[in-house]
Image (tube, rainbow, N blue to C red):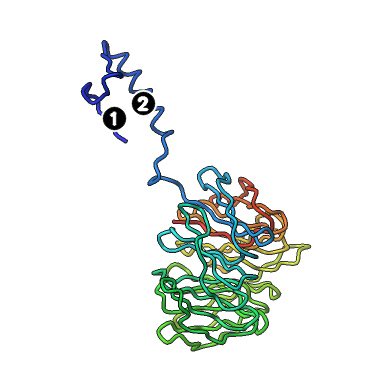
Amino acid sequence: MVFERSRDNFPLSYEFKVRDQAILIRVLLCFGAILPLLPEKGNAEPFAYVSNEYDDTVTVVDTATDKVVATIEVGDRPRGIGLSPEGKKLYLALGNDNVIGIVDTDSRKMVGTLPSGSDPEAFALSPDGMRLYISNEDANTATILDTESGQTIATIPVGIEPEGVAVSPNGRWVYVTAESTHTISVIDTTKNEVVNILLVGVRPRAVVFGSDGKWAYVTAEIGGIVSVIDVEEQKVIGEVRLSIDGEYVKPMGVAVTSDGSSLYVATGRANHVAVVDLASLKAVKYIPVGKRVWGIALTPDGKKLYAANGLSSNLSVIDTLTNRVIGTVPTGKGPWGVVVDK
């Protein structure tokens, strides 16, 4: 919004004369105080979206204020959650409905569904947003879906009890974890078939690629580790063991910083978020959060991390500069996943 100083630009009823410089300064200061209060959608801070599996809702949080701004009713047992590249569509794995729900982020209403195969648990979008790669936990398959047509492109056998899904930044590789076979199925998206199977830690849950696509990181719930995969070589090249005195560490959600220096890992019922230095592959800090921390997500600028605490029904807000909790945000019941728009 721009205010011209010319008198001719004011409506007649608001016309006034500036008699001296002091009055002019006071008028300009008044406008200066008002302008920051006027909402401008283009400058809005990102929103965080939280899937609440026990009350079938999504909580919307303004990341500038860390306040809840909306609650959206969706389908039955939302878990996996993700955004289209432009942020206009929010996708949800609705496990008990056997569909992917679609929420319009402008109206904040559920506007449709897509077929997902049975028992969708988690999913990942291709970088261009044209493909959804979905884990079907009870069918031991991964479903590839065209987001425009809603048509199933392929259904691919993977390991037993598939859960976590990630797509490489270049869109070439899809990794699908399998809890009962302790493996990663590597899908080549040019062929839509599994081209390799990697053995990782016991009961792998989540997987994430680094922003440069060179490395992938896989959490193992029972193994208590994070496996590090060389993507080009397609092999496990290291691991990070997580340990908290007196706690049973069960690594779950995972997020990597954009510069590839640090990894954040939710520890499940150990109620902490681990901070891992990726140069040394060592945990350097454990941040206490709420009960049964599950999904986690960084803001686009990397300054905050949101951690969904499933049994506390809230989000912990972590300042990544100090790696301390700076706030808590209430959610619906059983928050599972969290995603932040760009």
Res. 341 visible in picture: yes
Q: Earlier in the sequence, mark 1 or mark 2?
A: 1
Q: Secondary structure at mark 2?
A: helix
Residue at image location 54% in from the left, 42% down from the top: 65
Residues marked 1 and 2 touching at CB (< 8 Å) = yes
Location of mark 2 (residue): 31
In the rendered structure, which amino acid carries the disc numbered 2?
Phe
Looking at the rendered structure, the number of numbered marks drawn on it comes to: 2
Location of mark 1 (residue): 3
Image quadrant where one finds the N terminus: top left
Judged left or right of residue 232, residue 272 is right
Location of residue 259 with respect to 97 vertically, above or below: above
In which quadrant of the rendered view does residue 246 lie?
A: bottom right
Place of residue 202 in the rendered image (x, y in percent of width and height, measured from the top left): 68, 79
In the rendered structure, which amino acid carries the disc numbered 1?
Phe
Q: Secondary structure at mark 1?
A: loop
Residue at image location 62% in from the left, 49% down from the top: 325
Judged left or right of residue 290, residue 42 is left
Location of residue 28 with respect to 278 vertically, above or below: above
Residue at image location 65% in from the left, 80% down from the top: 138
In which quadrant of the rendered view does residue 20 lie?
A: top left
* Front-lying residue, 93 or 35: 93
